[in-house]
Image (cartoon, rainbow, N blue to C red):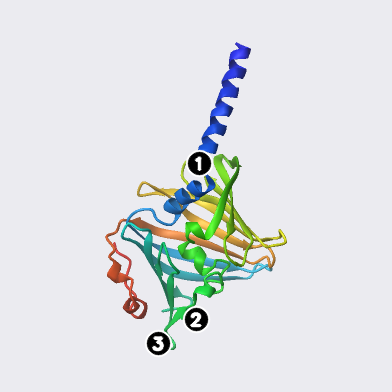
Amino acid sequence: MIRQTVLAVALAASASSLFAQSLSGEEIMQKEIASFYQPGKDFQAKVQMRLVNAQGSQRERAMNMWRVNAGTSGDQRYLITFDAPADVRGMGFLVWKYAKKEDDRWLYFPALKAVKRVAADDKRSSFVGSDFTYEDISGRDLDEEQHNLLKQEQVGDRAVYVVESRPKSAATYAKRLSWVDQERWLPLKEEYYDAEGKLQRTFKADKVEEVGGRWTITTRSMLNAQTGHRTEVVFKSVRYDAGLTEDLFAERSLRNPPTLAQ
């Protein structure tokens, strides 16, 4: 009986290892992108953002977010509008994300009544003072990085794949490690490192909930390891497949923000 038990455990471990090897780092990250950035035909939510410095001082922001998948090639559209505080109220951010070329991004400044195009080189700069970058908001293209599966381990009670991603061209980080849930395909943690191997930022999925049959990271955070500043984000009133159309994602929606569909 003992020998049978040992053999069963060994076979299970071997099967698990073979399964891990059957998926490449690229395949895992493709599944992660689909689950994290592309679930449903569209998405909308109210977003609460808290900026906390190393001394514990806090600032809060309230936003609305919409996303629609455009066609079947992986193109997407994103729209974010700001409700509070007063210094950002009425501000807007629009992204036309493309699967095979650089994305188009625009910011609307209500005080100037002006729309500014965000240069492609600015995609990894801070998103309106937070620890998230513009690229973090809408995601990066799969082929912008080289992905390698390193190992399997646990994050809490969740089995994950640990994947190392290295940019193929010059970037603000030298490598990114992702802990991807093996069942839900969501990133439970990410770490960004510079060329000297020093930790730059850490992303965490602080709360994962099932919304409309889809697993969703409803509370997430990003910590700047070098400054101690962190950004906490909570998604509320999340809804998938609300019937959004691509014509919502235009400059006029920056100047005259829509309301969330009920």
Q: Which mark is residue 23?
A: 1
The kind of residue on which mark 1 rests is Leu
Under tag 2, what secondary structure?
Answer: loop
Mark 3 and mark 1 lie on one chain; the one further toward the N terminus is 1
Residue 211, image x, y percentages: 38, 50
Under tag 3, what secondary structure?
Answer: loop
Mark 2 and mark 1 lie on one chain; the one further toward the N terminus is 1
**Residue farthest bottom in this picture:** 112
Badge 1 crowding class, 10 Å Cα cut-off, few under 14, some 14 to 19, many 20 or more, is: few
Mark 2 highlights which residue?
A: 87
Asked if the residue at tag 2 contacts the one at tag 3, i.e. Cβ–Cβ closer than 8 Å, the answer is no
The kind of residue on which mark 3 rests is Lys
Q: Is residue 24 above or below residue 84?
A: above
Residue 139, image x, y percentages: 48, 61
Distance in Å between CA atoms under marks 3 and 2 = 14 Å
Q: Which mark is residue 44?
A: none
Residue 167, image x, y percentages: 58, 60
At a point 50% along the width and 46% down the height, the residue shown is: 28
Q: Which mark is residue 113?
A: 3
Under tag 1, what secondary structure?
Answer: loop
